[in-house]
Image: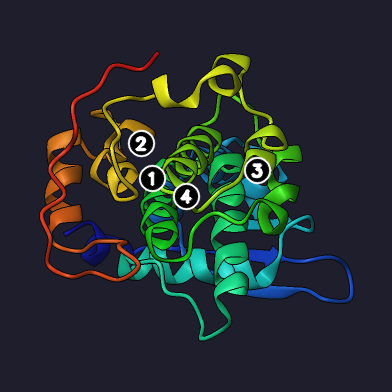
Amino acid sequence: MALFEALGGPTAQIIVGPLGNTQTFSMHKKLLCDSSTYFEAALNNGFAETTSQKVTLDDEDPAIFHIFAVWLYESEIVLQPATSATRETHLLKLYLFADKRGIINLANDTITALASFWVNHRVAKARINWIFDEILTSSELHRLILDSICLEFRDGFATEDDLKTSDLPKSVLVDQRDYRTTLSDLDSCLHSICHYHVHGPDGPLTQAECIETINKGHSIHKFNGKKYIQIPWNWD
């Protein structure tokens, strides 16, 4: 119903990319504002963007914005065919974009996609090292990476060097076997995915609704029909 209503309403022009390499997206205003606190403010705050209904994002990558645009209309993260490393990079950049622009549901979906991706491809510290300069240690993405690396260490897929160079808390480095003891195997982060999401009544899905969509395969990298019942555990 929301999509139907939006398609009958006004559009806004989003100009993405640095000067000389821009791409313009014509998108329905209601969808943009309903999904994002940033676009809600930019298109309704009474300033220049509100009058022109044009927003310039010269610090964003048009390729990443294109993924967002498809998600906005399809409610699915669709990545172009590419190497696993490129797809991983696009997901990490998509999370940064969603977090920066206040698109909570997209950030949640990206976290799910990354957790399921790392079940199949593991976390390669050297490949994702750049992301630590872009996120806070308190962010959900940082927690997901930390937990994934610890699980890989327990299962023999990561080394001591991976732990030492991953900006992990001292308590984890002292004895990672006592860390997140309720997470037992490499699927654990995906089975606990809602602990890395933001839920609430004002836009984002509730945890129950979120689990229901995940169990239908929403944003799962390679869906095999499993039920991802959440592992209960307290954040420590």
Q: Which mark is residue 197?
A: 2
**Mark 4 or mark 2: which comes first in sequence?**
4
CA gap, disc 2 and disc 1: 5 Å
**Mark 3 or mark 1: which comes first in sequence?**
1
Q: Which mark is residue 156?
A: 4
The residue where tag 1 is placed is: 108
At label 2, the amino acid type is His
At label 1, the amino acid type is Asn
CA gap, disc 3 and disc 4: 11 Å
36 or 199: which is nearer to us? 199
User: Is 101 left or right of 6, judged from the image as shown?
Assistant: right
CA gap, disc 4 and disc 1: 28 Å
User: Is 59 left or right of 198, judged from the image as shown?
Assistant: right
Residue 59 place in picture, x, y as percent: 78, 55
The answer to whether the residue labelled 2 contacts the one labelled 1, judged by CB atoms less than 8 Å apart, is: yes
The N terminus lies in which quarter of the figure? bottom left
Please give the name of the residue rendered at 18% of the width and 70% of the height, measured from the top-left corner.
224
The C terminus lies in which quarter of the figure? top left
Please give the name of the residue rendered at 29% of the width and 50% of the height, measured from the top-left corner.
187
Neighbour class for label 4 at 10 Å: few (<14), some, many (≥20)? few
Neighbour class for label 3 at 10 Å: few (<14), some, many (≥20)? some
Secondary structure found at label 2: loop
Residue 102 place in picture, x, y as percent: 52, 39
Q: Nearer the viewer, mark 4 or mark 1?
A: 4
Please give the name of the residue rendered at 40% of the width and 52% of the height, measured from the top-left corner.
115
At label 4, the amino acid type is Gly
Neighbour class for label 2 at 10 Å: few (<14), some, many (≥20)? many
Q: Which mark is residue 9?
A: none
The answer to whether the residue labelled 3 contacts the one labelled 4, judged by CB atoms less than 8 Å apart, is: no
Secondary structure found at label 1: helix
Quarter of image, res 58: bottom right
Q: Nearer the viewer, mark 4 or mark 2?
A: 4
